Amino acid sequence: MTDVTGLPGFSRVFAADRLTVGLALPLDGPDPWRAAELVQRAERSGFAAVWARDIPLSVETFGDDGQEYDPFMYLTWLAAQTGSIALGTAAVVLPLAHPLLLAKRAAGLDLMSRGRFILGLASGDRPEEFRAFGLDKGDRGEIFRENLSVLDKAWEYPRGELHPISWSRGRVGGAEVVPKPTAGRVPRLMVGSCLQSMEFNVAHGDGWLTYHRSLPEQKIMVDRWRATARELGVGFRPFGESLWLDVLEDPDAPAQGRDFGYRLGRNALLELLDSQRRMGINHVSVNLRHGRRPVEEVMDELGEYVIPEFPVSVPPTA
């Protein structure tokens, strides 16, 4: 695959032997003006990235609509309001996306953000969405692979070189997807398992963003990921984790496990992040939305006491 690790967004978030901290969107409801203010605050505080979710439909049984807005529209708005923070999807449900339209939208955001966009991809898990899109949820692993192949082919050749693309649900000839991405393709992360083997995800992704696990369990996953990358000879492939946090006012409050994360004070958080860094985790996407305190208050505390210990990776000078 074309090397995209030097792009501003990817290189800000990921570097070997380092850990950075990002934020899951929405930070405080779906309002885009409020979101812009908070993401600007996050950028000033030194957070590495913000991550938007792709939730096509509001499903009653799930009770979580993410930022509500289409992630590409939302992140394009945030790109216009910021200058350095990385902007990612965590994640686009690839089996539900038309691969040619996805190629166009992702390349457009890559260009309009000046290389700050990171495309996170997932296989999806909401049965109602697959039914609504006329797909069998049981086929999503196969559709994921096929759509990923089409996405790659849409970016494979320079503008003006027309090559036919055929797949089970479409064919294009005498036409191409424009614009083309900054570096020939957009950096991408596999989010969750994507219903693929680890070998596939290492070979076809620029990194992995997975779910929170206990430290011993996650260490096993990090080691497997690194070993697979070595076996395939692909070089550095970063490892990231999503983490729900309820940061308490008492800085010395001990960590208590909760769904998908912890309730804790900032000193316990510092210890946790240091343990994650030492085991080989490169990025943690923090979800603050379900905490007890105002999000600005928590962001400011993390920006003052936590982020300086885990600074962003400095993009290489052009």
Image: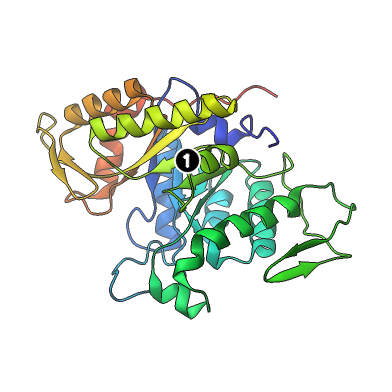
Q: How is the image coloured?
A: rainbow
x 24%, y 48%: residue = 260
Taking depth in this image into account, of 169 and 129 the one nearest to the observer is: 169
Residue 281 in view of the camera: no
- The quadrant holding residue 297 is top left
x 62%, y 54%: residue = 148
State the image coordinates of residue 86 (x, y, percent, origin top left).
52, 40
x 38%, y 27%: residue = 223
State the image coordinates of residue 185 (x, y, percent, origin top left).
69, 44
User: Label 1 belongs to which residue?
Assistant: 198
- The quadrant holding residue 215 is top left
State the image coordinates of residue 135 (x, y, percent, origin top left).
52, 74
Quarter of the picture holding the C terminus: top right
State the image coordinates of residue 232 (x, y, percent, origin top left).
57, 29
- In the rendered structure, the answer to whether residue 50 lies left or right of residue 178 reads left
Quarter of the picture holding the N terminus: top right
- In the rendered structure, the answer to whether residue 120 lies left or right of residue 254 reads right
Instruction: Determine whether 61 is above or below 292 in the image.
Output: below
Q: Which residue type does callout 1 highlight?
A: Met
x 18%, y 48%: residue = 293
Local packing at callout 1 (Cα closer than 10 Å; few below 14, some 14-19, many 20+) is some
Instruction: Determine whether 42 is above or below 317 in the image.
Output: below
Taking depth in this image into account, of 145 and 187 the one nearest to the observer is: 145
